[in-house]
Amino acid sequence: MTATPGFLDVRDVRKAYGAIKAVDGVSFSVGPGEIVGVIGPNGSGKTTLFNSILGQIRPTSGSVELCGEDITGLSPLELARRGVGRTFQTLQVFGGLSVRDNLIAAAQEFKGTLPGRLFAKPDAGLGHHADEMIELFRLKHVAHLPAGRLSYGQQKLIDIAMAFMPAPRLVLLDEPTSQLDPVAGDEPEPAVTPLDAGLATTGAAPTSHR
């Protein structure tokens, strides 16, 4: 019997820099509605693995498939066009834009054609979707504020919400709960709960330190 491919199938991926094996034969699958965690200490190769999957670097060997299609070595732009999103360890928010405008900016590239965007409404027709994401990620009370004025934890939620704005088929989250401060109210649960409850049809492969 032929196995049904997952959203993402990573098979024996390796990345070496000379004699240094940064990633050494990693395999896993992410199915529809699954959240798969890649866990390891600092320096264990988690981000290198993500970069090998997502086109920032090409793996030394192994393969990556998205819904049965071999995407090994495709560029980040080609993967984005296939519905693959990601976050990085460092924040990718625009500090001078409001939370709502950050979300709209994250999806504009995927909305119609360039001439169409030039003559579209200021929110590019994405305002309603941005408001839905703001509600889902519990950011309504700060939606009008510049992102740069918010706590690191709130900016982290914006960063994750931005990755979901283009309605991707698969999202990979690199260290989504790192450097959050429970004392300051930056609980990781709001970052995880929306992914599981509201966005369950999207595969997500977060990493975290242990």
Image (cartoon, rainbow, N blue to C red):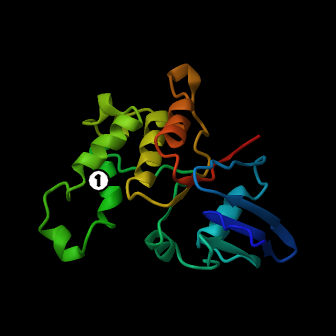
Residue at 36% from the left image edge and 43% from the top image edge:
133
Give how far across and how far down residue 177 sits, in percent.
Answer: 59, 39
Residue 30 image-quadrant placement: bottom right
**Circle 1 residue:** 104
- Residue toward you, 35 or 61: 35
Quarter of the picture holding the C terminus = top right
Q: Horizontally, is 159 left or right of 3 in the view?
A: left
Disc 1 secondary structure class? helix
Give how far across and how far down residue 62 sits, in percent.
Answer: 76, 76
Give how far across and how far down residue 57 sits, in percent.
Answer: 64, 74
Residue at 48% from the left image edge and 49% from the top image edge:
91
Q: Horizontally, is 51 left or right of 22 in the view?
A: left
Residue at 45% from the left image edge and 54% from the top image edge:
163
Give how far across and how far down residue 161 sits, in percent.
Answer: 42, 46
**Residue at the extreme top of the image, as rendered:** 183
Residue at 70% from the left image edge and 63% from the top image edge:
49
Q: Horizontally, is 117 left or right of 88 in the view?
A: left
Mark 1 packing: few (<14 Cα in 10 Å), some, or many (20+)? many
**Residue at the extreme right of the image, as rendered:** 19
In the displayed structure, would residue 10 be above or below residue 165? below
**Residue at the extreme front of the image, as rendered:** 1
Quarter of the picture holding the N terminus = bottom right
In the displayed structure, would residue 156 be above or below residue 141? below
In the displayed structure, would residue 36 be above or below residue 76? above
Residue 97 visible somewhere in the drawing: no
Kind of residue at disc 1: Ile
Q: Horizontally, is 16 left or right of 198 in the view?
A: right
Residue 35 visible somewhere in the drawing: yes
- Residue toward you, 24 or 97: 24
